[in-house]
Image: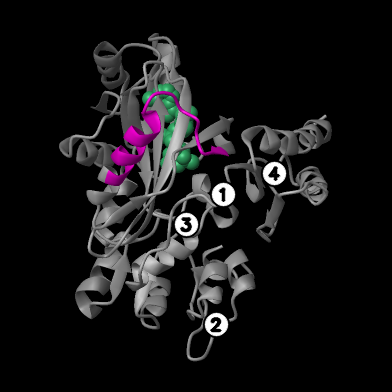
């Protein structure tokens, strides 16, 4: 999606990913002297090869080798956005929380945890049960989270086994009524603009549906958007940031975590906003004027197409159904191999009212339910 936005602005790009035929490489043919690079995001050689070709380097996943980015920045002075220091801070969710707390942002209580039965008992004594245990690093789609409900040794050992080999921290359980998110775009100079607050609905810890905008009561949207802008102000470097939040019964907003890149909760912006998160990410990292972050349609819903097994037929059935729904836009990513829990595409519905969007979503959910049996 970033490659597609770059193509419209005639910005030549080079992509680093494993394989010759990855989704972004299907979208853009590199223009000489650029070439795409084949290698993992952790490979120093691959990252150096990419950096040697470009003026501006950005990331779409935070689990990259940040030491090499640091080295490249020192050695070459090319623009890297978000800055390696921002990526490093966000890679470790505990350090990220410490940073957000230092900056006065609203968070659920959390503590560092030593990897032992005693260490976890200490966290339970501080934060109570249920306790949300989290891996500090390499977490996504809830892989890396473990909810501990009792404090007997067997349950704690099971948690340690489930989160084997990972440095841990713990969070107090948040009894949220809704989950929400705000995309924010930040210029190289640190000017920030929020997109509207959206409601995110998760299934099995994976983002399933996004409702935009979030019809939140009493000033919650404005407060959440200001908090998200404040979050983006605290991180160096340009680009878009996804700020995930919890909304409590009384309207309290907590920041859950931050993604320093285009985010699933912002996919709706492609059809529903004046400027998509991808185009604004490019404009920001290239030092171009930012585009308007407001919606151009009163209401929008995004439905993720998530693999149910190695068989893509069920999610393709939903995509096919969407072709018959007015206002529905189908995105299939061209990933090789469908897997249970893998994000294979999404559908964005736009409409004149929330009710119209929900009516348009219904046949898609029915198809999904039927295909899942
Ligand atoms: P992502 O794919 O968004 O990067 P992740 O693996 O980093 O996910 P989190 O966002 O930390 O994980 O948590 C995943 C989900 O778990 C949240 O969206 C929320 O539903 C739930 N969750 C996380 N922290 C808490 C908490 N402290 N209390 C209650 N539920 C929580
Ligand atoms: Mg995360
Ligand atoms: Mg998350």
Residue 307: image tag: 4
The reply to whether callout 2 and callout 1 are in contact (CB within 8 Å) is no
As drawn, 184 above or below 243: below
Looking at the image, tell me whether mark 4 or mark 2 is earlier in sequence order: 2
Looking at the image, in which quadrant does ligand 1 appear? top left
Looking at the image, tell me whether mark 1 or mark 4 is earlier in sequence order: 1
Q: Residues within 10 Å of mark 4 (few under 14, many from 20)?
A: many
Residue 277: image tag: 3
Alpha carbon of mark 1 to alpha carbon of mark 3: how far?
9 Å
Marks 4, 3: nearer the viewer: 3
Q: Position of residue 199 (x, y in %)?
A: 51, 34
- Which residue corresponds to mark 1? 268
Q: Residues within 10 Å of mark 2 (few under 14, many from 20)?
A: some
Q: Residue furthest bottom?
A: 33
| Magenta residue check for 223 | yes
Alpha carbon of mark 4 to alpha carbon of mark 3: how far?
24 Å
């Amino acid at each position: 999606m970033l490659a597609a936005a770059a193509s419209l602005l005639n910005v030549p790009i080079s992509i680093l990913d494993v394989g010759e035929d990855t989704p972004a490489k299907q979208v853009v043919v590199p223009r000489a002297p650029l070439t795409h690079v084949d290698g993992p995001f952790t490979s120093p050689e691959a990252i150096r090869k990419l950096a040697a070709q470009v003026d501006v380097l950005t990331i779409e996943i935070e689990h990259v080798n940040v030491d090499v980015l640091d080295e490249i920045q020192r050695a070459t002075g090319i623009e890297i956005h978000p800055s390696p220091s921002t990526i490093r801070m966000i890679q470790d969710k505990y350090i990220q929380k410490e940073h957000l707390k230092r900056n006065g942002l609203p968070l659920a209580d959390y503590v560092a945890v030593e990897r032992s039965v005693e260490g976890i008992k200490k966290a339970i004594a501080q934060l109570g049960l249920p306790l949300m245990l989290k891996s500090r690093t390499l977490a996504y789609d809830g892989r890396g989270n473990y909810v501990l409900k009792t404090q007997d040794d067997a349950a704690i050992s099971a948690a340690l086994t489930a989160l084997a080999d990972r440095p841990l921290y713990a969070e107090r359980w948040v009894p949220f009524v809704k989950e929400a998110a705000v995309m924010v775009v930040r210029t190289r100079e640190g000017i920030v603009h929020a997109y509207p607050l959206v409601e995110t609905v998760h299934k099995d810890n994976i983002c399933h549906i996004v409702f935009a905008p979030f019809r939140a009561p009493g000033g919650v949207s404005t407060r959440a958007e200001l908090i998200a802008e404040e979050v983006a102000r605290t991180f160096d470097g340009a680009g878009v940031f996804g700020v995930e939040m919890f909304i409590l019964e009384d309207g309290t907003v907590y920041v859950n975590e931050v993604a320093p890149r285009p985010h699933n909760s912002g996919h709706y912006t492609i059809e529903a906003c004046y400027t998509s998160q991808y185009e604004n990410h490019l404009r920001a990292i290239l030092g171009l004027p930012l585009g308007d972050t407001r919606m151009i349609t009163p209401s929008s819903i995004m439905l993720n197409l998530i693999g149910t097994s190695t068989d893509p037929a069920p999610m393709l059935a939903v995509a096919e159904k969407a072709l018959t729904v007015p206002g529905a836009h189908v995105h299939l990513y061209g990933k090789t191999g469908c897997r249970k829990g893998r994000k294979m595409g999404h559908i964005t519905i736009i409409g004149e009212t929330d009710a119209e969007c929900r009516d348009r979503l219904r046949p898609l959910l029915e198809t999904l339910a039927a295909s899942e049996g």
